[in-house]
Image (cartoon, grey):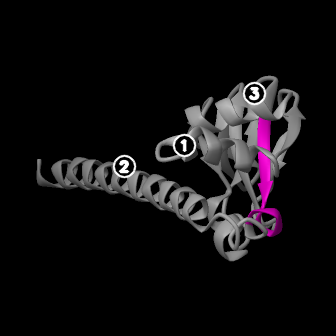
Amino acid sequence: MSQQADAEIIKQSVLGQDLSDQDAQLLATITRHQTLNAGDVLYQEGDQDNTLYVIVSGKVAVGKDEGGRWVDIATLKEGAIAGEMAFVDGSPHTLTLKALKSTEVITIKREDFESLVENAPVTCYHIMRAIIRNGHRLQKEMNARFLEMSRFIQNQYTM
């Protein structure tokens, strides 16, 4: 894929909300591509890789292996990002991501991103804000699910 194509993908992703065309082009200069077949693992729980992933095409299951049984937590589709915390602070991944079908991702390594900070601080700010905004959205969704589950459990015991 060309840098122009990568820039368009970035603009359409979670990262692109506040990026100008020039910002997306700049970010595209540090991207790499990874292709997964159905069943391939993007990353395992416990891995540390300092990489941000942008789903270009396909679907990725987010889950956990619980005693030999896969527990599905979410599905990521085109435009979603993954690996934000490992990218931001180097923490190990807390879940496993694996391709549900043929999937392509763009990867951004933290050290490559950090090379942009001095010359493009506003671009970096917009990207970090998009990552935080996405994390906040996910937290709100999890809170809503938790409340729904709590209400369900409470209703089971009050009947």
Q: Is the residue 126 above or below the residue 8 in the image? A: below
Asked if residue 71 can be seen in this view, the reply is: no
Q: Position of residue 30 (x, y in %)?
A: 82, 52
Q: Regarding mark 3 in the picture, which secondary structure is present there?
A: helix
Q: Which residues are magenta?
A: 105-113
Q: Residue beneath label 3, please?
A: 5
The three-letter code of the residue at mark 1 reads Ser
Q: Earlier in the sequence, mark 3 or mark 1?
A: 3
Q: Residue beneath label 2, please?
A: 141
Q: Regarding mark 1 in the picture, which secondary structure is present there?
A: loop
Which one is closest to the eye, mark 3 or mark 2? Answer: 3
Q: Regarding mark 2 in the picture, which secondary structure is present there?
A: helix
Indicate which disc residue 48 carries.
none
The three-letter code of the residue at mark 3 reads Ala
Q: Residue at x 73, y 65 (%)?
A: 116
Figure quadrant of residue 103: top right
Nearer to me, 154 or 53 = 53
Q: Earlier in the sequence, mark 3 or mark 2?
A: 3
| Residue 110 included in the magenta stretch of the image | yes
Nearer to me, 59 or 134 = 134
Q: Is the residue 50 above or below the residue 40 in the image? A: below
Asked if residue 145 can be seen in this view, the reply is: yes
Q: Residue at x 62, y 29 (%)?
A: 78
Q: Is residue 87 left or right of residue 102?
A: left
Q: Residue at x 63, y 60 (%)?
A: 84
Which one is closest to the eye, mark 2 or mark 1? Answer: 1
